[in-house]
Structure formats: C-alpha cells, structure tokens
Image: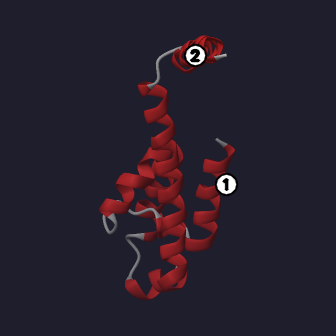
Amino acid sequence: MSGIVFLVLSGVLVGGIDAVDHNQDGLWFIAQVWCGPIVIGIDLLNQVFIAPLPIAEKATLVGLSHANEIGTLFIAMAGLMNFVVLLDLFQSKPGEDLERRIVRRAGDSEVSGGTK
C-alpha cells in the first residue's frame, strides 16, 4: 500500500495534477483508476480547477512534455500494481500453496527412500 501511495504522490509531484485526466488521457486513466479514490479525487481537482482555464493560464499550471508523461506513467504503474494484487487476492485459494508443499515433501521422501 505504501508503494502505491508513494508512486501516486511522486507522479503528482513530477507531472502535476493534470497527470490524471480522464478526458484527455482516457486509456491512461483506466490504468490509473485502479489506485482507488485518491486518483478520482485528483482527477476531480483537475477537472474543477485546471481544465476550465484558458490555454494561456493553463500552460503555466500544468506539467509539460516529459515531466507530465513520467507523472502519468508513475500513477499508471501504481494502478497496475494494485490491479495485480487484486487479481492475486481473488485467484488464490486459501491454503493452496501449503497443501502443495506438504504433498511434494511427502512424495520426495517416498521416492528417495525407495531408491536407497
């Protein structure tokens, strides 16, 4: 959790609040939204305070070029990391790994005992 929050905050610091924008960067937003409500809040701030400004004022407040792209990438990586954790949570069965280890160890001792 702390890694995801660190990536989101780093992305906002590097790329600015407009690194999260569902109108301009829809595909990136799909990856970013898996971070949860913090990304939706950042997008809301962007849409309320930054997006309605004229282009001349907006250019002084937003991250430009590669800095904005790196911030967008950081937040998208955080979202995809969270997505992978959720996939792992929902795909695993309780005790599945432990049962495999016990069966493997029991099988290994029988095989090694029979060859000596």
Element carrying mark 2: helix
**Residue designated by label 2:** 111
| Mark 2: amino acid | Val
Quick check: 96 above or below 86? Answer: above
Quick check: 61 above or below 13? Answer: below
Q: Quadrant of residue 107?
A: top right
Find residue 74 and report its horizontal and vertical position in percent. Answer: 55, 63
Q: Nearer the viewer, residue 57 or 100?
A: 100
CA separation in Å, label 1 and label 2 = 49 Å
Q: Nearer the viewer, residue 100 or 116?
A: 116
On-image quarter of the N terminus: top right
Q: Nearer the viewer, residue 52 or 86?
A: 86
Name the residue rendered at 51%, 57% in the picture.
Answer: 77
Determine crowd level at label 2: few under 14, some 14-19, many 20+ residues with C-alpha closer than 10 A. few
Q: Is residue 36 visible?
A: no
**Residue designated by label 1:** 6
On-image quarter of the C terminus: top right
| Mark 1: amino acid | Phe
Find residue 69 and report its horizontal and vertical position in percent. Answer: 48, 75
